[in-house]
Amino acid sequence: MARPLWLVTVLLFQIFRVSAQDVEPVTIERPFLWEFRRLDSKVTSYLFGTIHVNDPNITKLHPSVHSAFSSASAVWFEIDFAKDKVAQIEAISLPPGQRLDSLIPESTVVRIDQRLKKLSPLLSRTILPEFRVVMWPLILANLEAQIRHLGTAPMDMQLQVSAQEAKQKTGGLEDPARQLQPLLDLPLEKQIEFLEASLDIMDADDASGINPLEQLVKLYAAGDSEALQEYLLQEMNRPEVSEDLKTLFIDTLLIRRNAQMVRAITAKLKAEPDDVHFVAIGTAHLLGKGSVVEGLRGSGFTVQRVSVADQRPVDGKKKE
């Protein structure tokens, strides 16, 4: 999933504090870490699959990830969280003068308000920006993830701060204004359809006693790529999700973006072929057909998942 939602985390830090909910702790068993290199190169770089949560048990790097991260001269993310703040805010917010309650049915506004209150009695639309209609499903999901551990930044944001402190080069692979453009270009009726389908799924999960966030975190911690991919596909195939929305997410927001990221990664390594690069992107971009892993292999790279027991020294040297 795209991740321009650092803003929600910042707002939560500034607005209020709540106690963390009781959640069964998890431990990273096998990280989503791949090593890759060009066939004509001896320098190994790394792909790391992240998850946009701030659970300290998840954000603490596995030793193999820490070793790979520390060896890198350059660290790349989907977007540059530090540099692209203004562009991110503009991309996910309504134009000045527009209001959410003038664009969607009143009943849908009420459902959003109820969902916010369910997350926290202190939370309401009045203390949040006027987000675009199509962004609300992502906002609500992100709020649930961030509200459990307020005061802790999500994994990818922590990584960029660590890279900057270590004087590693950092940056983004994508333009934040274009990252979500396929969603933003949807006709209003389709945006409302996406929003209401997402609210239907949240209500169904509540009624069934299912917590998708906890399931996702456990699968991520286990490091089983097949199980995680199967879970993501099951979620995409839920009856609430129409075929055209499914196509939008899989073909446009995943596979096409994967191809763009492969081109960006290839360009980064071509520009600095002697450096170790560490690429941290959402794990979904690294799994299955049309993934970044598959795209890199097709572009002349060898790509191999790193074993937990594989602690051998990394290739290349970090710039001083």
Image: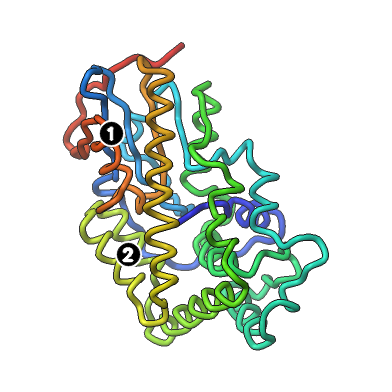
Q: Nearer the viewer, residue 277 or 162?
A: 277
Residue 210 in the figure: left or right of residue 196: left
Residue 235, located in which quarter of the rendered image?
bottom left
Q: Residue at x 21, y 31 (%)?
A: 302
Residue 19 visible at all: no
Tell me, yes or no, whether the two marked residues, 1 and 2, touch with CB atoms within 8 Å. no
Q: Which residue is mark 2?
A: 232
Q: Residue furthest right?
A: 97
Q: Residue furthest top?
A: 320
First reached walking from the N terminus: tag 1 or tag 2:
2
Residue 118 in the figure: left or right of residue 212: right
Q: Nearer the viewer, residue 163 or 229?
A: 229
Residue 40 visible at all: yes
Q: Residue at x 38, y 26 (%)?
A: 277
Q: Which mark, by number, is residue 166? A: none
Q: Residue at x 46, y 53 (%)?
A: 52
Element under disc 1: loop
Q: Return the x and y of residue 87 as percentages of the image width and height.
A: 67, 46
> Is 130 above or below relative to 264?
below
Element under disc 2: helix
Q: Return the x and y of residue 300 as percentages of the image width and height.
A: 24, 30
Q: CA distance from mark 1 to mark 2?
A: 26 Å
Q: Which residue is mark 1?
A: 299
User: Please, what is the three-letter code of the amino acid marked with disc 2?
Assistant: Leu
Q: Residue at x 50, y 49 (%)?
A: 154
